[in-house]
Amino acid sequence: MNTNDYLRLLPKTELHCHFASTMSAAQLIAFADREGVVLPTTDPALLFNFTDLADFLEAFRAAHQVLTTADDFAQVAYDGVRAAVAAGSVRYREYAINPQYFAPRGIGYREILDPIIDGLRAAQTDLGVGFRIVVAINRHDSPADAVQLVETMVANPLPEVVALGQDDLTPELTEDPARFADAYALARRHGLRTTAHAGERHLDSAENVRVALDVLKVDRVDHGYMIVEDPELTERARESQIPFAATPLSTTICSGWTLDHNHRIAQMVRAGLNVSFSTDDALFFRTDMAREFQEAIPAFGLDLDDAKNIALAGIDGAFCDDDEKRSMRAQFTAQIAALDAALADTPTSR
């Protein structure tokens, strides 16, 4: 065993995973051909070349257009889990699903959620990967639409749907978390957990993270990298241990950042923040959970102890119940002990 093997086999959660991005490239191309959705190219080597976050979001929206039938949703759900387990030892995953992308084509809330849950339940039975679902506001739509989405969630309770989140950008290409304060307040009143994309790019400010914490009152922050520009807010986050779901590889595309010792995620880890790793959009960023750890940990100047802490932080930040967290922590601890022993017994590791 070497360090790369160790990081691949390290048990992992993934808390920031957009469902449509769990498709394979072959599925995306085949579904697009079936539905008459025009892609820039059908060459997987060229299909995912993006210049920035706004450019990526055009492809992200197109991916939702190719998913049409219940079989599509269930197949993508199951196959995505199988791929995640094989590539990166994922043991638990939370999916951001945005019903608003499908509404213009007349695909209703339960028509989306029910088959996805069926596929994920089957994968849990076969592969042992737990899951929960975060229903995401489309920030490109209006605050009134966001409130209506939460009302739909409340009217259609599903045990696997536990939280409200958000994705996309506003029509002005901003985050503007306060715009959706009414939807978040309604979600909290009905006992839903909350998370929000905030402080993702250099164009976004640490103030957006503050708004997510103080106005939206989130339980977890997606991204949040710009927090390190505000020492007071960083210290507050360290003390509270609010979870951050970070996605290292996405920052090289959406923000053009280099994975190095000065990367904002590296700064967050060194500052003692509660940081876990996720892929965000594995399909579009050509990544998986193994790659996130294998590339980011050494590039950030972190070590295997940091990697273990990041893996365990994913349990802390998960929206599952306490019993499931205790079970996962016991499993992870045992698996990590076995990996430590295997690494120690490898001559090249000494």
Image (tube, grey):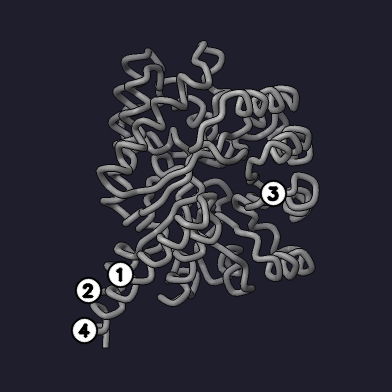
Residue found at the far bottom of this picture? 350
Mark linked to residue 345: 4
Report the front residue among 347 and 299: 347
Kindly report the distance in space between the C-alpha atoms of the residues bearing marks 2 and 1: 7 Å
State which quarter of the image contains the N terminus: bottom left
The residue positioned 71% from the left and 41% from the top of the image is 188
Tag 2–tag 4 contact (CB < 8 Å)? no
Label 2 – label 4 distance at C-alpha: 8 Å
Residue at disc 3, secondary structure: loop
Left/right of residue 67 with respect to residue 265 in the rendered view: left
- Give yes or no for contact between labels 1 and 3 (Cβ–Cβ under 8 Å): no
Judging depth in this view, the residue of 62 and 255 nearest the camera is: 62
- The residue depicted at 52 percent of the width and 16 percent of the height is 108
In the image, is 14 to the left or to the right of 186? left
**Label 2: how many Cα within 10 Å (few below 14, some 14–19, many 20+):** some
**Disc 3 marks which residue?**
218
Q: Nearer the viewer, mark 1 or mark 3?
A: 3
Res 121 → quadrant: top left
* Callout 1 secondary element: helix
Q: Is residue 18 above or below residue 318?
A: above
Alpha carbon separation for disc pair 3 and 4: 44 Å
Q: Specify the amino acid type for callout 1.
A: Tyr
Secondary structure under the numbered disc 2 in the rendered image: loop
Amino acid type for the residue under numbered disc 4: Asp
Residue 13, given in percent of the width and then of the height, sits at: 43, 55
Image x and y of residue 293, in percent:
41, 62
Residue at mark 2: 1
Q: Are marks 1 and 4 in contact (CB under 8 Å)?
A: no
Helix, strand or loop at label 4? It is: loop
Q: Are marks 2 and 1 in contact (CB under 8 Å)?
A: yes
> Which mark is first along the chain, 4 or 1?
1
Name the residue at 66% across, 29% down: 150
